[in-house]
Amino acid sequence: MIRQVLALERQVFDFLGYQWAPILANFFHIIIVILGLFGTIQYRPRYIVVYTVWAALWVAWNVFIICFYLDVGGLSKDSDLLTFNISAHHSWWSEHGPGCVRKEMPQAPGVRTTESHSYITVMGCLMDYQYIEVVHSGTQILVALLGFVYACYVVSAITEEEDSFDFIGGFDPFPLYHVNEKPSHLLLKPMYL
C-alpha cells in the first residue's frame, strides 16, 4: 500500500512538471504493483515474479534518475531527456520547492501570444530541486528493495507450499495419515466345521 501512495505522489509531481518519461515509468510501476498485489492475494507466483523483475528494473530507473539530476557522466539535468524533447519543462520542484520565491518577469508590452513564455526567477529555496528529486528516487529505491525481498520470500513460500502437498497415502514414506495394521494373531480366521 505504501508503494502505491509513493508512486501516486511521484506521478502527481511528474505530471505537474510535464516530464513524460517519468510519467510513463510511474504508470507502468503502478500497474505492476497492482499486479503483484493481486498475485500475492490470489497465490499466483508468476505475477509475483513479474513484480520482482519489475522491482529490479525500477531500482535501475531510479538510479538513472539520481544520476540524471546529479549530472553524473554525460547526463545533465538541464537537458530535455525526461520530456522526450517535446517541451522545455523541467522538474516541478525547480520553481516550487520548499521556501522558493517565484517571480515572473513582465513581458514586453504589446507582445502577447499564446506561445509566449515569461522569464521566471526563483530565489530563496531551502533545498535545490535536484536534491529533492534525488531524495524521491532514493526513497523509491529503498521501498523497491524491500518489496523485492518480500516478493522473493512470498514466491518461495508459495512454491514450497505447492511442492509439499501430499495425497492421502501418497509418495511420502511416513505419511501423516497412516493406517495401523493389526497384528496377525488378532486377525479373524475362517473356521471350518
Image (cartoon, helix red, strand yellow):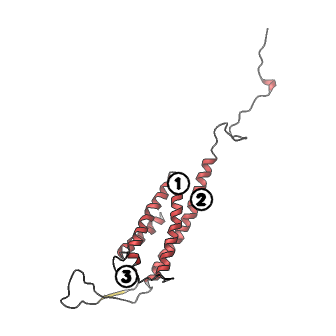
Residue 30 in the image, given as x and y percentages of width and height: 43, 63
- Image coordinates of residue 175 in percent, x first then y, are 70, 40
Residue, x 43% and y 61% (percent of image)?
31
Residue at horizontal 51 percent and vertical 60 percent from the top:
51
Quickly name the residue at label 3.
96
Q: Secondary structure at mark 3?
A: helix
Which residue occupies 75% across, 30% down?
A: 181
**Which label sits on residue 116?**
none
Residue sitting nearer the eye, 124 or 35: 35
> Label 2 belongs to which residue?
153
* Left or right placement of residue 42 versus residue 17 in this view: right
The numbered mark, 2 or 3, whose residue comes first in the sequence reads 3
Q: Amino acid at mark 1?
A: Arg
Up/down of 74 relative to 173, above or below: below
The picture places residue 123, in percent across and down from the top left corner, at 38, 90
As displayed, is residue 123 above or below residue 22?
below
Given the image, on which type of amino acid does mark 2 rest? Tyr
The span from disc 1 to disc 2 (Cα, nearest Å) is: 13 Å
